[in-house]
Amino acid sequence: MEKFEYFSGIPEVGIVPRAPHAGPLMRHVYEQEHGRGGFAGKVSHTYHLYPPTNWLPEESRLLDGAGFAPHWESPLRPVGGVHHALGVLEPEAPRDVYRGMGRLIANATAAMNVTAPVAPMDYFFEHHSATLVFFVHEGSGTLETTFGPIAYRKGDFLIIPKGITHRFECDQGPQYYWAYESFAGDPEKAEAVTTGQFLTHSRRDYKFPRSLDSRNEAGRFEIVSKTDGTYARRVHPTHPFDAVGWRGTYLPYKFAVEDVRPLVADRSHVPPSGHTVFLLPGCYICVFTVRSAEKEGLWVPFFHKNLDYCETLGYHAGRFFSRGGVFSEGMISVHPVGLPHGPHPKALAALLDDKRPQVFEEVGIMADFANPATISDFALGLAQPDYMASWSGYTMEPRFLHDPGRLAKVLRLAERLADARDKLRPAGSEDEGH
Ligand SMILES: [Fe+2]
């Protein structure tokens, strides 16, 4: 008999029944619903060889959080009034991805962490109170999940929805990840009606698991879960990745930073909102990537006060021109709510001297946290003491110092320049060459 196949439009892999909660397959595999919003929101179903609740009760217990991941629970304190430059975390043996997690910044709905794992994870992990957004600053490996494996490398974002069982299998070599937690909702793709769904990236750039690596293994399999500051361990007698199929839209995925195709503007400065890739409750994540410099408008950041957010910027790769050589790869700046900042003196001097680069050779990941935000003692331990002094050019270099004649000079210039229109000379127009 001829075989007909139908595509429902909902992603699925492997063996799945015709519909959730129905059909004869229900008596041969164990269906598990991963449901958000009290089972009224996003949902996926996985189909398992063994009941997901087959834990060994005598080995299930709460863990001492301070012992398991001491820096993840680092005390938090208000942040404000002083900028911080955080140095690179030294890997600490024998920390793995989660045991070595260090919290940096947090507000009520989101947090930023850093980890430099050196040891393999000998357990599986579930975050019960946040969807995780990893950015792989350095390293590579495989993210193993209930839905199948996702290979990753430097420059990938990895989105691990709340509650999904997973494990990092890191390759050899240095690993360095920034990890953002979203406590009140999943990251949503940022886009504007003016630029459409393909700028600055497309949903087609999200790469979901496509194949299952189903395990029918007996043994002793530990799953560590985190719910706020509570850590728990349970042990199962069968491998947790025993799913033979799944269907749904609540899924882990990856997204490569190279797939960000930035907005550029010849005659004005694109603000951070034009570089936003993910919106989280109380947080937005932007990618500043390799792009051509504005030709006629301001091509350094404007001096600014972010009046509602504490800004973090992780320096991923390249030369960070606007920061005047203060930052190297792996460092993070923390610019608290309200405190002015902008180009460092060397960058502003280049603007004034008309030394415009053709291209900004930089990749940075910015995450801004709605006020009130807090900084951890762990982060303060990484802070370099002299960062505020990096703007000292503004009080040392003659061109920026007080000049008794400056008011008159600026007023004189203003009469001529304040109302000047842009030059607009289309090739072939009558004005060309005049
Ligand atoms: Fe800023």
Image (tube, rainbow, N blue to C red):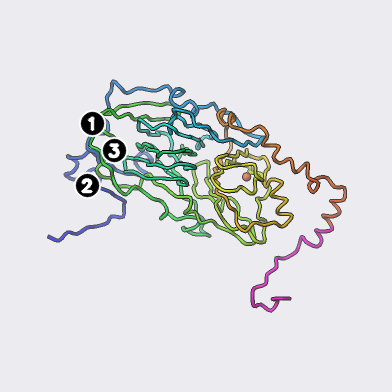
Please say whether residue 45 is one of the residues in the magenta stretch.
Answer: no
Q: CA distance from mark 1 to mark 3?
A: 11 Å
Residue 156 place in picture, x, y as percent: 45, 46
Mark 3 residue element: loop
To which quarter of the image does residue 75 belong?
top right
User: Tag 1 or tag 2, which sits nearer the N-term?
Assistant: 2
In this view of the protein, can residue 179 be seen by the observer? no
Closer to the chain start, of discs 2 and 3, is: 2
Question: Based on the displayed image, in which of its 4 quarters is residue 160 positioned?
Answer: top left
Query: Residue beneath label 2, please?
Result: 17
Q: Tell me if residue 427 is in the magenta stretch.
A: yes
Left or right for 354, reference 231:
right
Work out whether mark 1 precedes mark 3 in sequence or the reverse, and give the earlier one: 1
Above or below, 35 relative to 3 = above
User: Which residue in the structure is indicated by mark 1?
Assistant: 218
Check disc 1 and give the amino acid type: Ala
For badge 2, the amino acid type reads Pro
Image quarter for ligand 1 equals top right
